[in-house]
Amino acid sequence: MVNCYKLEIQNYKSYPLNIEKMTNILIKDLIQQLKDIENADLWIDENFEKKLLQVDEQTAFERPIPDIHSVAEIISHLTEWRKEAFSRLKGNPRGLEMTDAANWRSNEDLKVKGWENLLKEFYTSQQQIISFLEEKDDDYLYSPYLFAQPSFPHNFQYLVTGLIHHDFYHLGQIGITIKFLKK
């Protein structure tokens, strides 16, 4: 069995590796994930475009249950954190904090802005991050975020990966909100 394993490794090594194709694999993958959650045919059978087409100006601001956020509140929250992540990706100090009012704006405040404007800001915030990352490479992702708390140092890869996780979490939350709105 050991000889077979060695043979497989030897055969593997004999194939030429295309290093050019392997460069920046991580950043390309993260960019693709950011694009996919917006409007791709994902294995979870959901994306933001598909979910948000089920919402209109009236239902966007409705809370189906008092303790469940409206779709507009969730979209605003996601947009604020995307803006914050974009600022940090550009090397700026931390700005938005969990306790800030902008983290979860009220429906009353959001209605003034309007559903169409919220959607525009939401999609624009994602495109800004994608455009920025398209000019970077994997080395950038491995660079430390200099303004991280000393007790929790991290790099830009961690920041982008967290943003993707955050988007998926709230995509599910939007799905639950919409489900309750349809009852």
Image (cartoon, rainbow, N blue to C red):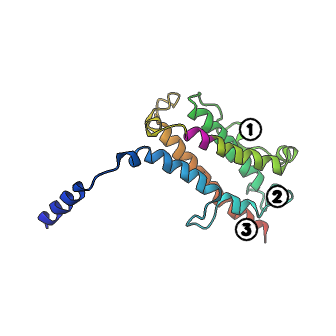
> Please, what secondary structure does the residue beneath circle 1 have?
helix
> Please, what secondary structure does the residue beneath circle 3 have?
helix
- Magenta: predominant secondary structure element? helix
Q: Residues within 10 Å of mark 1 (few under 14, many from 20)?
A: few
Which quarter of the rendering shows the C terminus?
bottom right
Write down the region rendered in magenta: 129-134
Residue at the disc numbered 2 = 62
Q: Residue at x 54, y 52 (%)?
A: 32
- Residue 33 point in image, percent of width and height: 55, 53
Residue 45: which quarter of the image?
bottom right
Tell me which numbered mark, 3 or 1, is placed earlier along the sequence. 1
Q: Residue at x 70, y 59 (%)?
A: 49
Q: Disc 1 residue type?
A: Ala
Q: Is residue 120 left or right of residue 16?
A: right
Q: CA distance from mark 1 to mark 2?
A: 19 Å
Residue at the disc numbered 3 = 179
Q: Is residue 11 above or below residue 25?
A: below
Q: CA distance from mark 2 to mark 3?
A: 12 Å
Tell me which numbered mark, 2 or 3, is placed earlier along the sequence. 2
Do residues under tags 1 and 2 come within 8 Å of each other at their CB atoms?
A: no
Q: Disc 2 residue type?
A: Glu
- Residue 63 point in image, percent of width and height: 79, 58
Residue at the disc numbered 1 = 101
Between 143 and 29, the one nearer to me in the picture: 29
Q: Residues within 10 Å of mark 2 (few under 14, many from 20)?
A: some
Residue 133: which quarter of the image?
top right
Q: Residue at x 59, y 38 (%)?
A: 132
Residue farthest to the bottom, as pictured: 183
> Please, what secondary structure does the residue beneath circle 2 have?
loop
